[in-house]
């Protein structure tokens, strides 16, 4: 009876705090939406409950434990005043957080893609911040020493080379080796309504894709955690002591607009829906909007044929992109900022850019492109003039094979 009252008081206190406290969202972190999307977004927002908000399901599991939290700026509890960060809320409940593990882009989400992030101390909370995108990407056994549990809560976008799922896999692996339980708080996948793209091949695995899954895998981060665990994808065939706290009122067809940008260069719903396709430009010398306010909503380069395109722009250093490709150069290309929600990966954009490149020798960064594509065939297909339909037809067999495995782990 006393334990029940203690847990009840803790839950009541947490909800009092989140209702009374306004979130600390910054202008740079806010995600933008178009006015036409707003009614649908508001309708969905009333229904969907992220796992972090389901405090009654996980706060009792943290009490009396020494924990670490794997988190960034997206790890929030939503309330009538906006949101509060999960770490702030747990500290207010006297949950014993020993330190925070931060992924790519850092704890506050303000580092460039791929930028080395050092260990530091959080000014607001005084907690030690241990970077998982610096000296090590997998927590060391020393960094896990003395912990009873690791809590993971990061918003994903459902694209294989978006590195948060690799961070989660390495965290699970380290915890399995140490015998430390892991709790994953689930969040919606804004690209969770379809499966598409080239499948990663074992020979090309890296931090940009650690497992043999399609580019867009159609799973929440919690569903994917279960798949990693049960398919024995952790090193040494180990299994983590894993608990996934599920969402409420979300399905794979639900539209969900992210209220906080998940990383500096995904500022809105349009960039997120285009990211699976335009993200392939990361393995080329083409600029995909970094260094502008329309990241992953356009593409261009100074070496694309100016006579073909009536759209141009000049990338300059800005928030989240200190050194954008084609910096200071007039880039010719396409504006995609009016794109509607997509249901597939398309190679049309990269085929268009390659076809209209006046110097094709400048186009591919072969090693980087192969890591993003997951195979070395895609570059050759593009160079040989294959159409989007011809390329996509070579993906079907592996996609169907993956879907059969995926079906076992769907929660929604």
Image: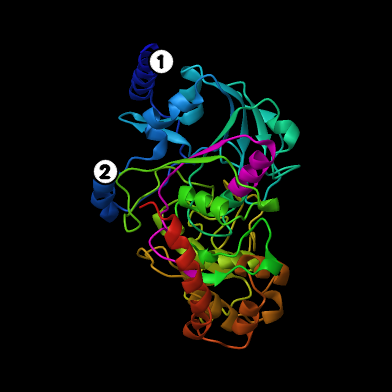
Give the number of the mark in front: 1 or 2: 1
Does 387 appear in magenta? no
At horizontal 45% and vertical 55% (from top left) the residue drawn is 409
Q: Nearer the viewer, residue 315 or 43?
A: 43
- The percent position of residue 370, horizontal first and vertical second, equals 67, 70
Q: Position of residue 345 (x, y in %)?
A: 47, 70
Distance Cα–Cα, label 1 vs label 2: 31 Å
Q: Please indicate whether residue 323 sits to the left or right of residue 398 in the image.
A: right
Image side of residue 121 versus residue 86, left or right: right
Quarter of the image for residue 136 reads: top right
**Is the residue marked by circle 2 packed among few (<14), some (14-19), or many (20+) residues within 10 Å?**
few
Q: Which residue is mark 1?
A: 3
Q: Which residue is located at x 57 percent, y 46 percent?
A: 319
Q: Position of residue 27 (x, y in %)?
A: 46, 38
Magenta part of the chain: 167-196
294 sits to left or right of 138: left
Q: Is residue 26 toward the left or the right of residue 326 in the image?
A: left
Q: Which residue is mark 2?
A: 47
Residue 300 sits in quarter:
bottom right
Q: Quarter holding the N terminus?
A: top left
Residue pictured at 38% horizontal, 11% vertical? 2
């Amino acid at each position: 009876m006393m334990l029940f009252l203690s847990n009840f008081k803790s839950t009541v206190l947490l909800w009092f705090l989140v209702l009374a406290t306004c979130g600390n969202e910054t202008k740079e972190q806010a995600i933008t939406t178009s006015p036409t999307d707003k009614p649908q977004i508001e309708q969905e927002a009333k229904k969907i409950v992220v796992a972090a908000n389901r405090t009654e399901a996980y706060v009792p599991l943290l009490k009396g434990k020494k924990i670490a939290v794997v988190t960034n700026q997206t790890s929030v509890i939503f309330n009538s005043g906006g949101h509060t960060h999960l770490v702030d809320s747990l500290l207010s409940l006297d949950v014993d957080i020993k330190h925070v593990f931060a992924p790519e882009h850092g704890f506050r989400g303000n580092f460039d893609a791929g930028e080395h992030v050092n260990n530091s101390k959080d000014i607001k909370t005084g907690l030690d911040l241990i970077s998982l995108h610096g000296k090590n990407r997998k927590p060391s056994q020393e960094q896990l020493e003395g912990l009873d549990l690791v809590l993971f809560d990061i918003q994903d976008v459902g694209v294989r080379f978006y590195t948060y799922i690799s961070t989660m896999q390495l965290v699970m692996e380290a915890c399995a080796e140490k015998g430390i339980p892991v709790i994953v708080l689930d969040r919606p996948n804004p690209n969770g309504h379809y499966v598409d793209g080239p499948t990663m091949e074992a020979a090309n695995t890296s931090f940009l894709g650690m497992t043999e899954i399609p580019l867009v895998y159609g799973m929440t981060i919690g569903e994917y955690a279960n798949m990693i665990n049960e398919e024995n994808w952790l090193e040494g065939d180990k299994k983590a002591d894993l608990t996934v706290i599920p969402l409420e009122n979300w399905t794979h067809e639900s539209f969900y607009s992210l209220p906080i940008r998940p990383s500096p260069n995904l500022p809105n719903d349009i960039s997120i829906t285009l990211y699976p396709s335009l993200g392939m430009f990361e393995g080329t010398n083409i600029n995909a909007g970094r260094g502008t306010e329309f990241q992953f909503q356009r593409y261009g380069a100074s070496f694309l044929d100016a006579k073909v395109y009536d759209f141009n722009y000049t990338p300059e250093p800005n928030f989240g992109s200190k050194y954008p490709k084609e910096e200071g150069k007039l880039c010719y290309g396409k504006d995609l900022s009016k794109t509607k929600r997509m249901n597939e990966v398309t190679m049309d954009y990269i085929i268009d850019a390659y076809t209209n490149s006046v110097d094709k020798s400048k186009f591919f960064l072969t090693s980087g492109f192969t890591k993003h594509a997951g195979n070395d065939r895609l570059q050759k297909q593009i160079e040989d003039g294959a159409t989007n339909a011809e390329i996509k037809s070579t993906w079907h067999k592996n996609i169907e094979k993956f879907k059969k495995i995926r079906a076992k782990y769907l929660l929604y």
